[in-house]
Image: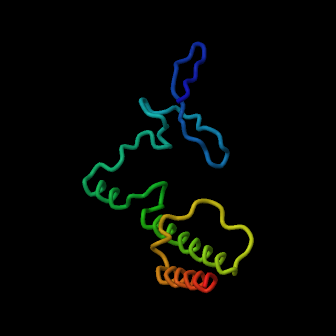
Amino acid sequence: MTTIEQPHATQCNRCAAVFKATGQRCTAIAVTGRRNCLRHGGASTGPRTEAGKRRCAAARTVHGQDTIAMRQERSLGSARVAVLESIGFAIGLLRGNKTRGRRPNQMNEVFPELQAMFQKMILERAKHSTG
């Protein structure tokens, strides 16, 4: 919270919200004891009824419409791509740089039959090259 001090004026806290379009802060006065003005949720108390609280808990959204199920599906999709990419580089189908960043935790959960077949193929290659 920023306190605006002017001579011969009352002190008031300004809204801490930032406009996405301009990147500038809201200049409205914040609700007493809060960080934001009325337009940016300063008067919000959250769900009050039991039904509203249950709906809010069931949705479990984070940052708007992004639910846990959506995050799980996105994570599985990136794990699928990582598995296919690793196999493609291992068999020589892909060349160049690998995708940057850490590998997904769920790589063992996607394409288990493909990964088992690939591991068997690697073991066979190792046997033929050594013996």
The one nearer the camera, 39 or 22, is: 22
State the residue at coordinates (49%, 81%). Answer: 116
Quarter of the image for residue 101 reads bottom right
The one nearer the camera, 68 or 42, is: 68
Task: In the displayed orientation, state which residue is furthest to the right.
Answer: 96
State the residue at coordinates (35%, 56%). Answer: 56
Q: Position of residue 128 (x, y in %)?
A: 61, 86
The one nearer the camera, 68 or 76, is: 76
Task: In the displayed orientation, state which residue is furthest to the front.
Answer: 131
State the residue at coordinates (53%, 35%). Answer: 15
Q: Position of residue 110 (x, y in %)?
A: 48, 76
The quarter of the rendered structure image containing the C terminus is: bottom right
Relative placement, left or right, of 88 versus 96 is left
Quarter of the image for residue 26 reads top right
Q: Position of residue 48 (x, y in %)?
A: 29, 48
Q: Position of residue 21 (x, y in %)?
A: 65, 49
The one nearer the camera, 77 or 8, is: 77
Residue 82 in the image: above or below residue 46: below
Residue 95 in the image: above or below residue 49: below
State the residue at coordinates (27%, 57%). Answer: 51
Task: In the displayed orientation, state which residue is furthest to the left.
Answer: 50
Display coloring: rainbow
Task: In the displayed orientation, state which residue is furthest to the top.
Answer: 8
